[in-house]
Image (spheres, rainbow, N blue to C red):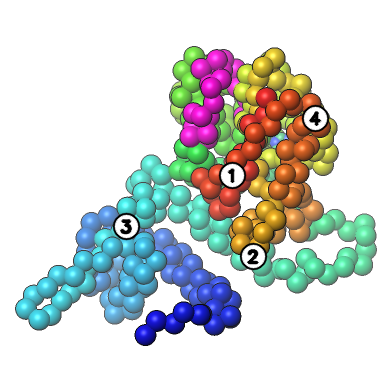
Amino acid sequence: MQFQHPHPLQPCWDLALASVQADALATALNVGLFDVLTEQSGAPEIAARLGLDPDKLEHILELLWSMDLLELIQIHAGTASTPRYCASSGAKRYFAKHSPDYCGDAWAFRLRSLREFGAQLSDHLQLRANKEEPPPSVPTDQCWATLARTKIVQEQAAVTAGAALAIVDRLPELKRVRHFLDLGCGPGMVAIALAHALPESHGTVFDLPPTAAVARQNIEAAQLGARLSVLGGDLTRDDIGHGYDLIWCASVLHFVPDLAQTLRKIRAALAPGGLLISIHAEIPPLAPQAATVLAYYLPLLMRGHHVGRQGELAGALLAAGFDHVGTFESDLFPLAPVQVQVCR
Ligand SMILES: C[S@@+](CC[C@H](N)C(=O)[O-])C[C@H]1O[C@@H](n2cnc3c(N)ncnc32)[C@H](O)[C@@H]1O
């Protein structure tokens, strides 16, 4: 029997169930399940290897299979069948530690920080009796550097760098790019990918000084020190350089207090004919599309940062003096869709 109309509360029940699924994934990462399951194996062998309870492990394996993280292979012997499991291609790529695209720590960090934020949501909502009190924790320069070193580096290497290359690849001007800037570069893996994709170019990465130091380490490790310069500073106050053919700026403008002033500064840093690629989430007008963006950016909004309504940033870019702003949506970036603005 097929039910055509789920109960109106089903989406809310699904939310509660997603929490169990998230715990199962966190546990799998914690015990190194995907490292073992790069090869096909059964619960008793895995349990023996990892020192786990085989009967209970069987249930977790089945749940992870239902989440498309494991493949199930039934081995038949007579009338009996024994389930064996293997990590799905996505789980092998992103959640097995030896994979170059491993980002299990970044995922687990997201889960922890979203839950910590959620646990404090009622506190965030309270009116502050003393208006002089600082608002709830804004990431400090050191926080950004820690995030860059631990979480953002994995996401950039596994996800963002590929997304950036897919986007710049569409640009007719790409072959003419000689000098690019990654503004608010984080750990610098996107700039490293751009430098590899544009062998004739040299690049500059800019971020707050402690994060710029993290980017410098990664650039040196990639042996790109001669082609990528590192600038540490506050983009709202300090010189970001000039004469760039391409400026890449992703998930940074949410944090600037005066958007119009920052956009004018970015435009002034471009060489004639240069272009800005802005990658920022905006809040779509319809509920289904807005749901992910609002959930992801709630912590940021509650801390007083800015996430615009869809179309707002394009208006601000035109007001800052760009002649043409082309916008498209991309779901290639971590967690929530973003608006990609190509500004000429
Ligand atoms: C959400 S991260 C995005 C990092 C990177 N662009 C990416 O897409 O992975 C925001 C970055 O902006 C940087 N940032 C924030 N405010 C800044 C400021 N005033 N000056 C320079 N960098 C800033 C942070 O240090 C951090 O690296």
Q: Which of the two labelled residues, at mark 2 and mark 1, occupies the earlier sequence position?
A: 2
Q: Residue furthest bottom?
A: 1
Label 3 sits on what residue type?
Ser
| Residue 184 found in image quarter | top right
Q: Which of the two labelled residues, at mark 3 and mark 4, occupies the earlier sequence position?
A: 3
Q: Tell me if label 4 and label 2 are in contact, CB under 8 Å.
A: no
Q: Quadrant of ligand 1?
A: top right
Which residue lies under the disc numbered 2?
116
Residue 303 locus on image (x, y percent): 77, 56
Q: Is residue 124 above or below residue 174?
A: below
- Horizontal side of residue 134 vs 6, given as left or right: right
Q: Residues within 10 Å of mark 4 (few under 14, many from 20)?
A: some
The residue at 43%/69% (across/down) is 24
Q: Which residues are magenta?
A: 164-183
- Horizontal side of residue 273 vs 9, given as left or right: right
Q: Tell me if label 1 and label 3 are in contact, CB under 8 Å.
A: no
Nearest the eye: 276 or 69: 276
Q: Is residue 153 above or below residue 90?
A: above
The residue at 93%/60% (across/down) is 131
Nearest the eye: 26 or 47: 26
Which residue lies under the disc numbered 1?
329
**Marks 3 and 4: which is nearer the front?**
4
- Label 2 to label 3, Cα distance in Å? 29 Å
- Label 2 to label 1, Cα distance in Å? 29 Å
Q: Which of the two labelled residues, at mark 1 and mark 3, occupies the earlier sequence position?
A: 3
Which residue lies under the disc numbered 4?
320
The residue at 74%/26% (across/down) is 322
Label 2 sits on what residue type?
Glu
Helix or strand or loop: what does disc 3 sit on?
loop
Label 4 sits on what residue type?
Ala
Q: Which of the two labelled residues, at mark 2 and mark 3, occupies the earlier sequence position?
A: 3
